[in-house]
Image (cartoon, rainbow, N blue to C red):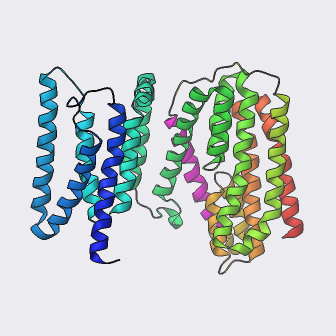
Amino acid sequence: MTDDQQTFYYLFVSLAIGLLIGVERGWKERGLGEGERVAGVRTYGLIGLLGGGSALLAGYLGPLALGLAFIGVAGVLTAVYVANLRRDQDVGITSLVAGLLTFVFGALAATGELAVAAAFAVMTTLVLGYKPQLHRWVGALEGDELHAGLKLLLISVVLLPILPNRGFGPWQALNPYQIWWLVVLIAAISFVGYFAIKIGGASKGVVFTGLFGGLASSTAVTLHFSRMGGRSAAMRPILAIGILLACGTMFPRMLLLAGVLNRQLLQLLLAPAAVMTLLIYATVLFYHWSMTHKRVDAEAPLKNPLELAAAMKFGLLLALIMLLGKTLQTWFGDAGVLALAAASGVADVDAITLSLARMSQDELALQVAGFGIIIAAAVNSLVKATMAAVIGGRVIGLRVGLPLLVAAVSGLLIAWLMI
């Protein structure tokens, strides 16, 4: 592409961005007469083109040219807005801001940042178009929910990035970043589960949280749903389904992590992991079929959108397990790998899966790595079964514990015979 063709292309994208935002604004304000709007479709298109042209001129005249052009556009749009206010026609400041963003996106496109400019133009258009829904969601928010969301942002966006991502303590076993990341993960799952159940109702919310929460941490989902089951007897059958969905999702995730690092390891793990998954999902289907004619009218105990205290306690438990696992590995050497896998499986499967998969590429035998991962998965399943029984009560304990026990024993047996 020649320089002239590239320039035409950049300016065309700048114009298209302006027209995109202009179509949404024009449709939203279609009931207003001529001169009663801050800008129309053509004006937004020209603002985007002006931003692109100003950015190109800034390459010859300096960045001041772009700044002056932006100030000029802001002044004109503000003047139109003030004129409408004087005529008692309050069209809102949203269109004014949209015009300024159109200029900025057009300038970004002309500087070669086409993907960024186009992506954020689409996102801006979506935000503008979903005004009623956004206002309805904000109006439905309660004070505790808003504060919970802010706390989640604090512990994830503010605190997590500043924690050191390296080992501390004996044998460098404690990594603050990894431990806090799991605390954030557990808190986020409880937060998502709260709104999933509030929006989708008891049955749909629990299934959604169990299935997708299991992609992140089935242990966290089990902990959260078991606590809910301890507070609401009527919710226990559907909560058991959510826990089993999360536990069953753990095995495909484990295969994915291992396969990315070592395809040969994936072949060893495929049969035992597939059997464990099928056993759990078959139980889920049976429970769902048995509840088909039963209506779940119970309301979830939506008391706390962000159970941060429980997440931090779990983080402390994880730190203890990480230290214990490193101690076993140091004391027993290569023979401690399987003991380490069992100890790690108490709290997490992903960490030991990644570690053994990496080790199997070099110094660790493939069979030992594969059997260690299955041991971790089996131990983790048994821990979740115990957690469900102790925290959630006898009903959840039986519904969750028996399938997880059968799956763990079956997986270990198949792994022993094959690996």
Residue 206 image point, x, y percent: 66, 33
**Residue at the spot x=75%, y=53% of the render?**
379
The magenta span reads: 306-329
Residue 232 image point, x, y percent: 68, 22
Query: Toward the viewer: 227 or 150?
Result: 150
Residue 123 visible to the viewer: yes
**Residue at the spot x=16%, y=39% of the render?**
77
**Residue at the spot x=24%, y=52% of the render?**
104
The quarter in which the N terminus is drawn is bottom left
Could you tell me how many numbered marks the image carries? 0
Does the magenta-highlighted stretch encompass residue 307?
A: yes
* Left-right relation of 324 to 51: right
Query: Toward the viewer: 270 or 74?
Result: 74
* Left-right relation of 306 to 396: left
What is the magenta segment's predominant secondary structure? helix
Residue 39 image point, x, y percent: 23, 38
